[in-house]
Amino acid sequence: MEQPARADDCWTLSDGHAGNVRQARALAAAMGFTDARDVMLASRVPWRWAAPRTWPGSEQAFGPTFASSLVQPPRIAIGCGRQAALATRLLRVRGTRVVQILDPRLDPALWDVVVAPEHDGLAGGNVVTLVGSLHIVDDAWLARAREDFSILAPLASPRTTVLLGGPSPHIEGYDAAGVSRDLQRLAARVREEGGSLLATTSRRTPPEWAQALKDCCGNIPGLRWFAPTTPGADDSDNPYAGMLAWADRIVCTPDSVNMLSEACATRVPVFVLGGDAVRGRLQRFHRSLHALGRVRALDDALAPYPVEPLRETARVAAEVRDRLRLRD
């Protein structure tokens, strides 16, 4: 028999990494669990090494607080990442319906539903695939961000937003010199047009990449925000949402699926830096974006082109609800 969803009966689980937290929360909200309880997992050795495989005593993998919570598990649990995949397995044994985001690298049948990006190549009867990653960026989110960051409105158009990530095992040969080269080309175009430049780094951005941004774009009107590199440092003043919302175009490094997915959920062109250096699974994701006409490689013109926002979260959430037999 189908059961109605209740917002106080869902947990999201992750290791606390921003990308995993954002995906789990996004799916929970899109499924109707706007008040889901966030559980941040701190796994212990040796279970940390084996996750999501279960070993004897795996109930203690996340400490006594999580172990005691298994006595009264939620009805729905949404996990993202390898550590969360172990936690969702433990909850499923106790009757929780579990959704695992990202390829758990084990048989998907160990979970009720697995949500995985197409570029992972995962298949199975209970696997739901999508292009890119889950996120909360839609028209309503962008409208709120424009209001929250209305201070950016007076900046000259076209407003170019730059999202700077960092090195990745899936990128070969794109280093600080390449970043600097591309930023110089971009800066020349912005100066020629007389627009403004908004740029933000991430916690993964190495100092030499951040310095390249300062050197190449320091005298262009706009706003630059540099993520704190100290673990646990507060980054609540990050204007990232406003930069997406007020952008006339977005320029993004190729390393982050989450960052590119959110950029592509806007209604403006997205240009990719260093895309030729991408390899492996990440390259498959980039090919999908190009095939959809959603991104283009950085060039000297940065000419606008027709855009259809890439927004997969609502579709995925509806399919997951259907598979779990949840009523509105």
Image (cartoon, rainbow, N blue to C red):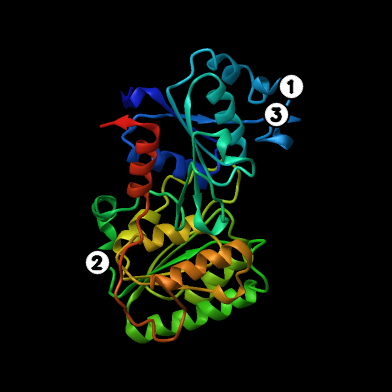
The quadrant the C terminus occupies is: top left
257 and 192: which is toward the camera:
257
Question: Please, what is the three-letter code of the amino acid marked with disc 2?
Answer: Pro
Between the residue at mark 2 and the residue at mark 3, the CA separation in whole angstroms equals 50 Å
Question: Please, what is the three-letter code of the amino acid marked with disc 3?
Answer: Arg
The residue carrying pointer 1 sits among few (fewer than 14), some (14 to 19) or many (20 or more) residues within 10 Å by Cα, namely few
Between the residue at mark 1 and the residue at mark 3, the CA separation in whole angstroms equals 13 Å
> Relative to 27, is 183 above or below?
below
User: Residue at 34% across / 32% down in the picture?
Assistant: 33
The quadrant the N terminus occupies is: top left
Quarter of the image holding residue 246? bottom left
> Relative to 277, is 3 above or below?
above
Picture coordinates of residue 114 (x, y %)?
50, 41
The earlier-in-sequence mark between 2 and 3 is 3
Residue for badge 1: 56
Question: Please, what is the three-letter code of the amino acid marked with disc 1?
Answer: Pro
Q: Is residue 294 left or right of residue 288?
A: left
Which element is circle 3 on? loop
47 and 243: which is toward the camera:
47
Whether the residues at callouts 2 and 3 have beta carbons within 8 Å, the answer is no
Question: Which of label 2 and label 1 is nearer to you?
Answer: 1
The earlier-in-sequence mark between 2 and 1 is 1
Residue for badge 2: 154
The residue carrying pointer 3 sits among few (fewer than 14), some (14 to 19) or many (20 or more) residues within 10 Å by Cα, namely few
The residue carrying pointer 2 sits among few (fewer than 14), some (14 to 19) or many (20 or more) residues within 10 Å by Cα, namely few
User: Residue at 39% across / 86% down in the picture?
Assistant: 301
202 and 260: which is toward the camera:
260
